[in-house]
Image: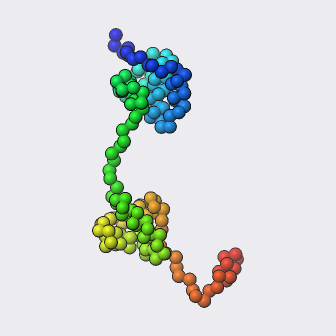
Amino acid sequence: MAGVYQLEITESEAELKQLLRQQKTASAKERVQLLYLLKSEQADTVQAAAQLLGRHRATAQEWLRRYREDGLAKMLQTQARSGRPRAIPQWAETALQKRLEAPEGFDGYQAICDWLEAHLGLEMKYKTVHKLVHYRLQASPKVPRPLSVEQSCEQREAYKKT
């Protein structure tokens, strides 16, 4: 009969409920919840369980195929996303971080672009450098304005208070 799944879930309802509480990611929780719905007979078919989870039937069947072939641990594993490599390598990012911590700093983001090209041989766009420094490294390229030698610390503190 079509639509009837042939799956023996070895874990008990209590074990699945406990396992559901232990999961840290949403995708792992959904997968354990699929097993729980089928084991507790809250869903009669895979299609009904998938509908309760808000997933497509084929997705639920793929999860169950992994469970049937490789077990629970393999079903809960997610593949790492490859993604696009970063525009600036990690070694260059650490070198830039050290240079940003130096007291002389930079005059602006364009100065950082020029420094990356001159010292590290990396030609970076202004926008890329800005995103890296401002958002990722949470740093500022600007250096504070120089203080007058004629000013005293007491005068500065008094000015700040008033």
User: Which quadrant: the N terminus?
Assistant: top left
Q: Please say whether residue 130 is visible from this viewpoint.
A: no
Residue 122 picture location, percent across and down: 30, 66
Q: In the picture shown, does residue 124 fall above or below 67?
A: below
Q: In the picture shown, does residue 104 fall above or below 136?
A: below
Residue at x 40%, y 29% (from the top left corner): 75
- Colour convention: rainbow
Q: Nearer the viewer, residue 119 or 62?
A: 119
Determine the image quadrant of residue 44.
top left
Determine the image quadrant of residue 118.
bottom left
Residue 157 picture location, percent across and down: 67, 78
Outermost residue, top side: 1
Q: In the picture shown, does residue 42 fall above or below 33?
A: above
Residue at x 47%, y 36% (from the top left corner): 26
Q: Please say whether residue 40 is visible from this viewpoint.
A: yes
Tell me if 63 is positioned left or right of 160 in this view: left
Residue at x 36%, y 42% (from the top left corner): 80
Q: Nearer the viewer, residue 2 or 139?
A: 139
Residue at x 45%, y 61% (from the top left corner): 137
